[in-house]
Every structure is written in structure tokens, then in C-alpha cells.
Amino acid sequence: MNQTVNAIEVRDLVKVFGHFQAVKGINFNVKQGEILGFLGPNGAGKTTIIKMITGLLKITSGSVLVSGLDNQKHMALIKKKLGYMSQKFSLYPLLTVLENIEFFGGISGLTRKELRDQAARIGAQLPAELLRQRIQALPPGIRQKVALFVCLLSDPEIILLDEPTSGVDPEMRRKFWNEIYQLKKNGKTLLVTTHHLDEAEYCDRVIIIHNGEIVWQGEPAELLQQNRQISIEELFKEVISKHGQN
Amino acid sequence: MRLRYLIKKELIEMIRQKEMLFLIFVAPVLQIIVLGYVVSTDIRHVPVGIVNLAKGNKAEQIIQRIDQTPLFRVRWVTRQPVDYLSYFKKGTVKSIIIFREALDKKRNLLKYPEVQILMDGVDSNTSLIAAGYFNGIIKNFILNDMGRRGQQLPLQAKVVFRFNPELRSINFMGPGIVGFILTILTIFLTATSLVREKEQQTLDTLLMSRLSALEIYIGKALPSALIGMVDMVIGLFVVVTWFGIPFRGNPLDLALTALVYVTAILSYALLISVFSSTQQQAMFFAWFSLLMFLLLSGFFTPIENIPSFLRILVDINPLRYLMKIIREIFLKGNGIAYFWKDLLILSGISVTLVSISLLNFKRFISK
Amino acid sequence: MARIKAIIVKEFFHILRDPRSLIIVFIAPVTMIFILGYAFSFDLNRIDAAVVDFSQSDFSRQLVNRFANNRIFVLHFAGGGTSGGNPLRAAEEMLRKEKIKEIIVIPVNFSRRLTVHGQADFGIIIDASNSNTANLVFQYNEMIVLEFIAEMKKAGQLFKLHTKIYFNPEAKSSFFFIPGQIAAILLMISAMLTSVSISKERETGSIALLFISPLKSYEIIIGKTIPYIIVALLDGVLTLMFSRFWFGIPIHGSLLVLLFFAILYIIAGLSLGILISTTAPTQKAAMLAAQILTMLPSYLLSGFIFPIDSLNPVLQAISYAIPATYFLRIIRGVILKGSELKHFLFEGLMLVLLSAILLLAASRKFSRQRKAVQ
């Protein structure tokens, strides 16, 4: 497989809301087939960056290339390659699990046969009585599972997950990351944001974002070695406070 | 067609919101029945008090006439003078009729008593009409009585009430109610739909899908239009069968007009949705707009009396055109040949609203 | 007492800081009274009439002149000349197109019939689509005809008939509607604001704090009600001033009496609002319910537009349960007729009764919900 084209390339990306600079000119790449973790406190700009990549937010300046395509010009093509799971999981609370899947699959262009297959697939993963329950009545762990499923319906190559594990208990979080690994094994590229610091160790590479800027990027092991820190929490605190002093 | 998934989802969501369900099914029926019985400018049972200070039986004959009409309800008859103002202030009667002995210039007793009609003018409409009827009853009696000895009244007007011979106000209000139902449903359902996506935070995933802005726009507008039209048809049915209002025109004309109208209202409601941040806000604006539309449309009162500086609001009010056309279709059986001008203006308004709405929608999506 | 004051202050802050409620409180009422003052009018100021005179005699011309000389009538002559066809049909087309409200048709033998038979007929065709207007038009026509007859019979000296209209000599619709609008505004505001208040607390969860506070249920309810009384009164004053100075509606009665009853009425409205908010599951439902339960009855069943006397008995009975019904009589009476306190003992009593019932129900519901949580 040709690995030379990065899955995502971000160049000098800036986002300004009125007078507030949310993202201050960042540069990074997401290599094909890797799991990249975005770490940072609330308000650091993680969601803003992801939304600019997906085209949900207008870019103030800079560029985003997805599989080599400029997302300002080829958004329609890019949408076919991207899968997105937002914070809060974004499922329709009044609809059931099956209805959500039918809806999202349908608007992604799946045929009726494909929709039936997908319904069977989720049926294998969840107990039958949950399938016909409305999303609003289900616990976060189940919702997360369904949200991920929905995100993958169009079989995207590159998957962006914004805080996919918020509000989910540690047991389910572990199961979730198993699924992520599965996806990577199947050749997908993943960009995951989280503020659970222990999850950073699951990623191939990690980028720490603070106040709209990249504070550190590299492999988690390297990060630990470099700084002889015991845990990533302390590292994180170190790094953030150092950055804040500048 | 991917759009049908969006429409199906919208319909499911609408049905599963209890408040909207109520709005869709119960409210219209309730409104028709209440409005149908309440909304009536027919004058009936106007309470009257009579002070008969005259002697002779002419006054009594007149009083009998008054008592016989369903228009008036004679509350009391007295032969003593009363404090008129106090009765009016209390509000127990809307009118007091005083019969007195009449004297001519030579102080001779006239054959017919002098009649004074006192009206509580607060409800100007009722008092004008009632006063008119009093005048008519009394004068007719006197003139007929005078002519009893073989002479007829020299002049008689034969009056024909065209289009609504029974003079039922429900015939005028009913078609308006049908238009009202169409409006209330489409406005409320549509205005909240986009805001709901915002609040549920499902808007982003919707936008990330392959649907274009126009498709999302239509997907949000169509379901409410559908439900609105269905309810309108139900309303039509009730109004014609239960209240017996004549439908003399062509249903296709009505369908066409309704379609053009619904487009205008939908676009307006989507505008509300784009600019509101919570569903309550959307509902408030929807309700307020509905009220303004209704009041400036000629539904309750004729729009002729609206002063010129407010006329601009009336002239851009889509409901005003619907009201006029729908009434024409029901009562006069007018076809497009008669109301094409109004339909044209309505179409113009629709197109303008759709453009503004779509533009803002697109801008809203790509912030 | 200090505890209740704390709630009152908090509610005030809520109102003042929420731009939405500011709109409801100030902008909406002023807009409504402004527009409604102008939009609502049953007045008939002009009757366009087509005259089709087949007789063309002295007598017919006399008749037509009587209409022409009346300020309200604007005559059009549907001539057969240019259109070449039947003038009556041309007139009917005008009627259909709503260019005229009536057609006066004078038959060919009009004059002859009078001289030979002593009685002549002519026809009036009135567009009755709007029956109210048709009624008024009919009255005007009849008045002219009867006057003409009376003159022909020289009956002027034979009887005397006067009409006097009290309180509203020019019979202006605005006198009728604007005080009514003030009543409707007060009810809507008080009910809407309060209905949202408790639902909002329930949705944001702050109601739990209220539940566990040492305040008694009725203290909470009272504390929540008082700020809105003041706000609603402010609104009442605002709209009243508008009606007096902009629309020129004179105030004949005592403002103090009005104030007294207004407070009673507002309390009734607030009680309704609180009842709605303790019952409605969501803010959205609360708002919807408030709108439907205040707007519809107070516009339709209270005598605001349509006289209660002409309603059917069932609806008349319902109107007795609506606070607006009573306050409408009071406000119209005080403002337009100069009525006094003693005239409204029954209405005042009913307002108090309704408020008491609603407040009691709201209090009971609230404490029941509270006990359920505890």
C-alpha cells in the first residue's frame, strides 16, 4: 500500500471567533493507518480543529488536506472518506437504535439490502430488546456503541472521534479501545480526542493542545522517556504549566 | 431518494413529541369546535330594559314586537323612571328604551309615543347594529300601523343577501378557521424543527452527511407541510359537514392556493428556526407571529379600516391573501379568473420568503 | 418574611437578565396594543354601491339622490354603454370582485307602480359574505329608506324617535377593543412568565434546591408570584398610558379602583401560570399550554370581541370560569363608563374566588411533588 500520502495534513490552521483566537496557526499530520490522540483541557480548541477538518466550521486561514484533497474545494469527495462522531454522540434521542441506523445509513446512500445487513450486524452486537428502545432511554455505554456503529456505516477510511469516551465507565472504555484497535487493523486511520489521560497510551502518537496551540507532539513512550515522568498526568500538568508561563 | 429518510425521521420525531402530537391532533379539532361556536358576530339576546311612561297600547304593541325577536332579550319592563346611568355602569342591560307621551307644537297628544333609545356604546359594533334594528322595528311598526287603514307603505326595499342569505357569521369565519389551522400547524412544527436539531446536537452529524443544504431544507419543510395540509383537509371536512358551510368553488383552486401559501409560511418558520437558540424562543416567536398574521389578515375584522401606515404590514401578510381567496372560493365559488391577482402577489411573497430563508439557512450552516 | 424576600429578589434578577422575558414583558405588549388598536375595527366608514336604474324617472332619481347625499355611500353607475352588455351583470361582477358592497336595482316600472298602485318596490343586493358588515350595511340602507318614506308620508310630525349612544358617541371600535386588549395582555404576561419559571427550575434542576429549602410550599409560591405582580402592573400602566395618550381613549373612572381590581386579576393570571408550570412536564409544554389556555379563552370567550350574550349556553358557562371575563367588564366599565367599586362586587368576588382556587391547586401540587422527592 502506498503510504506516502498522509491521511490528513493541517497547515497553519487558524480559527478566529470575533476577537477571540481559538486556534492559533497549528501544523500537524495524521499518517495513514495510525491512531492519533488529541489531548488537552476543555476549551483548548480540540473540537474546533476537528470541526474545521470536517468542514462544519469555516476555516479563517490555513489549509486542510484530506488524502491530498483540499477540503475547501473537494468537500463532497472528502465526505465520502470521512467518518465523524461528535461529542454527546449525536444520535436522535426520540428514535430507536434501529431507526437511527436506518436514517444515517439511508442518507449515506446505503441500499435497502445494505441497511438490512447493517441491522443484522448491530443485532449481533446488542441484545434484541435494546434495539427497539429510544436512544434517550439507553445508558451512555450503549449510546457510544451505537454512535460508533453509525459513524462506520458508510465505511469511511478516516475516522474522527470527538471525546468518544466521555461519561462512559472504565470497563466500557477498554472495550471501546479494543474496537478502535480492530479498526486500525482493518487499515483505518483514526483521530481521537480525549481528556482521559490514561487513554493517551493507547495511541500511536499524541498531540497536546492548549489555548489553540500545539504544545507537544510525539509518541507516548518517547514522551515518558524524555521527561522521566511516571505517569502521563504529571507530564501533562508539567507541560501545560510550562506552556502557560510563556 | 435519500430525502425520504430525512422526511421519515422528521415525521417519527414529530409524532413522538407529546406536545406536538397534541398540537397536531387535538388542538385543531378543539379549535374548530370552539371557534366555530364562539367566533360569531351574530347579534343575539342583547339585554334590553324598557321604561314605559306612556299611556295607551301603542307602546305595549311595540314592546311586544321587541320581545318577539331573538335579537333582543327584554330583561325588565317598568313604569317608573330609572337611573339609566347606573344600569349601564352595572352592565346588566345594554340598552334602555323609554316610551313617553309625545306632544306636538300645540301641546296636543300625539298618537304615537315618543321613543328614546339609549344604548351602551362600549361595544360599538353591537350597539350600532342593535340601535339600527330598534329603529327599524319601531319605525316599521308605526309606518305600518299608520297605513293600516288600507294604505301600504309607498316604498319597499326588497333585500337580497347574496352569498350568505342566512347571514350566518360562521359562513364568514369558517373558511378563515381552515386557513388558520394550516398556518398554526406549519408554523409551530417547522419553527421548532431546526432548533430541535441544534438543541439535540444532531445538527452536525446531519450536516456531515452527503445531503446538500437544499435537501436538508426541503427535508425539514416537507413533513410539516404535509401534516399541515392533512389537518387543513380535516378542518375543511368538519367545517363543511358539521357547521354546514357551503363550499361552492373548485377544490383544486383551494389546493393550489394552499400550496403557494404553505410555502410562504414554511420559509418564514424556518427563518425563525435559524435565528432562535432554544425551542422556547422559537415557540414564542412562532406564537407572536401567528397572532400578528391573524390580526392583520381580515380574519376577525375587515382590513379596510386599517390606517395606511400599517397597511404595508397587511399587504405583505401572506395570510391576508389566503383569507380573501379562501372565502371567495367557499362562498362565492370564484375561480382563478377572479383571484389570480391575489394569487400572483401571494406567489411573489412566497418566492421572496423562500429565497431569504434559503440564503440564511445556507449561511447558518457554514459558519 | 426575609426568606420570601430572598426568593422575590432572585426572581427579579431572572426576569431582568433574561432578554427573552424582557421582550415578553415590554416589547410584545406595546407592539400588540399598537397594532391591535389600529387593526381591530368593525367600523363601517364607506359603502360602495352600484346603481342600476332601469326606470330613469324623477322618482327613481329622488331615491338615488337620497343615497348619494349620505356621506357613507359612494355610488357607482354600472352603465350598459361601454361594456355593451347587461348593466346588472356588470354590477354583479363588481360585487363578486368585491369592488362594491351592494347593488341598488330600480326596476323599469318603478315610477308607474307608485302612481298607479301607490306602492313601488326596488331591490338591494348586499354582499353578505361578511355577515357583520352586511348587517351594518343593511341598517344604513333601511335608515335611508325609512326616512324617505317618512318624508313622503309627511309623518315627521306624527312621531318622535331619538337615539342616544352613551360612553362612545362616535361608536369607535377602538374604545371597545383597546381596554379589552389591556386585559388580554395582562393575562397572557402573568400566565406566561410564571408558567415558564417553575418549569425552568425543574429542567435546570434548581428546583431540588427549592424543595429542600426550609421554606414552606406556600411561601415559595407566594415568593415566586410577587415579582410578577409588580412586572405585570408595570405593563398594565404602560399599556394604559399608551391607550390614553396615543389612542385618546378617555379614562372616566377612578384609577385606584382599576388598580385594585387589576391586582386581583393579575393574581388570578399568575395563579393560572403557576398551576400550569407545576403541571407541565417541560418548559416547552408549559409555554404551549400557557399560550393556549390564556390566549384562546381570553380572546374568544371573555367578551373581548364577541359578546357573551350571543354565545351558546355551554360556552357561556365556560366564560364564567375565565378571569378575563370579569376583568373585561371591570376595565371597560371603569375606563369608559366611570363605573365604581360598588358596581363590581360580584366580579371582584369571582376574581378572588378563581385566584384562591387556582393558587390552592398550585400549592397542593407543588407540595405533593416536593413530598414525593423527599
Image: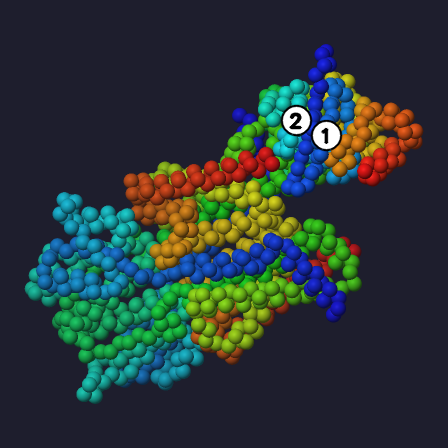
Query: In x, y percent, where is residue B312?
Result: 40, 51
Q: Are marks 1 and 2 on the same chain?
A: yes
- Which residue: 49% across, 50% down? B290
Considering only order in the chain, which callout, 2 or 1, is on the residue closer to the N terminus?
Answer: 1
Residue picked out by circle 2: A63
Q: Residue furthest bottom?
A: B107
- Viewed as shown, does residue C302 lie left or right of C205? left
Query: In the image, residue C373 lies at what x, y percent?
Result: 76, 54
Quadrant assignment, res C269? bottom right
Q: Decide: is C268 above or below B258.
A: below
Q: In the rendered image, which quarter is residue B106 located in?
A: bottom left
Residue drawn at x 79%, y 29% is A207
Residue flagged by tag 2: what amino acid is it?
A: Ser
Q: Where is residue A204 in the image (x, y as percent from the top left)?
A: 81, 23
| Left or right for A173, reference B111 | right
The answer to which quarter of the image holds residue B152 is: bottom left
What element does badge 1 sit on?
A: strand
Task: Using residue A236 as the reference point, say whether residue B323 is left or right of it.
Answer: left
Q: Badge 1 is on which residue?
A: A26
Q: Can residue B13 be seen in this view?
A: yes
The disc label shown at residue A167, or none: none
Circle 1 crowding by C-alpha within 10 Å: few under 14, some 14–19, many from 20: some
Q: Quadrant of the C terminus of chain C?
A: bottom right
Identify the element where label 2 is drawn: strand
Q: Tag 1, which chain?
A: A
CA gap between label 1 and label 2 equals 10 Å
Residues under numbered marks 1 and 2 in contact, where contact means CB atoms less than 8 Å apart: no
Identify the residue at image location x=60%, y=38%: B13
- Residue B109, image x, y percentages: 21, 86
Q: Residue furthest top?
A: A1
